[in-house]
Image: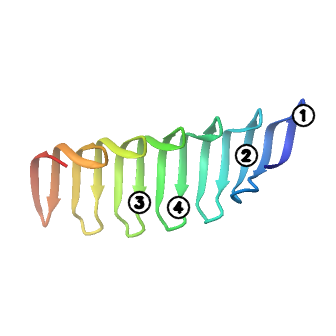
Amino acid sequence: MKYIGEFTDDIPNGKGVMVNLLDGSEYNGDVKNGKKEGRGILKFKDGTVYEGEFKDDNYNGNGILKYFNGRKYEGSFKDGKMDGSGQFTWEDGKTYIGEYVNDKKQGHGKLIWNNNKYYEGSWVNNKQHGDGLYFLNGKTLKGKFRF
């Protein structure tokens, strides 16, 4: 690890840049006791970029994760994973707006396809499960869905 920035008692604290020599990632932002803490931007070698809040060297709080392939997540993170409310957009325009737990759609959410079809309702472990509503070809279907 290479660090350029502010120090307190020979420990990285304040604003700084951290370069991971093993994976080529680069962090620019707040540092506390040698860890990413506060607000910052983390760029990966493949072009993926995270901008937002950090705690204990991980994404924690609100942020935006833009993947190298055009996908994007904007919302809440916990311990480096999507957790809480957020919006995920795929490269084809499909969008999920809702709740996440441990990187999976969980709770209430709405998945909108780019052809005006959508599902809104309960999600469990990334799957439509429970009370929900499908809108397809001008018709609305309401009911209980099972995976």
x and y, in percent, of residue 21 in the image? 76, 56
Instruction: Find residue 10 and name its label.
Output: 1
Labels 4 and 2 touching (C-beta < 8 A):
no
Amino acid at dot 4 = Tyr
Mark 3 = which residue?
89
**How would you rate the neighbour count of disc 3 (Cα within 10 Å): few for under 14, some for 14-19, many for 20 or more?**
some
x and y, in percent, of residue 100 in the image? 38, 42
Whole-Å distance between the Cαs marked 3 and 2?
26 Å
Mark 4 = which residue?
67
Which of 2/51 is in front? Answer: 2
Dot in front, 4 or 2: 4
Helix, strand or loop at label 4? It is: loop
Amino acid at dot 1 = Asp
Whole-Å distance between the Cαs marked 3 and 1?
42 Å
Question: Measuring 29% from the left and 55% from the top, which residue is drawn there?
Answer: 111
Mark 2 = which residue?
29
Residue 36 vertical placement versus 25 (above, below): above
x and y, in percent, of residue 27 in the image? 71, 51
Whole-Å distance between the Cαs marked 4 and 2?
20 Å
Question: Measuring 61% from the left and 65% from the top, which residue is drawn there?
Answer: 47
Q: Earlier in the sequence, mark 1 or mark 4?
A: 1
Residue 137 vertical placement versus 15 (above, below): below
Dot in front, 3 or 4: 4
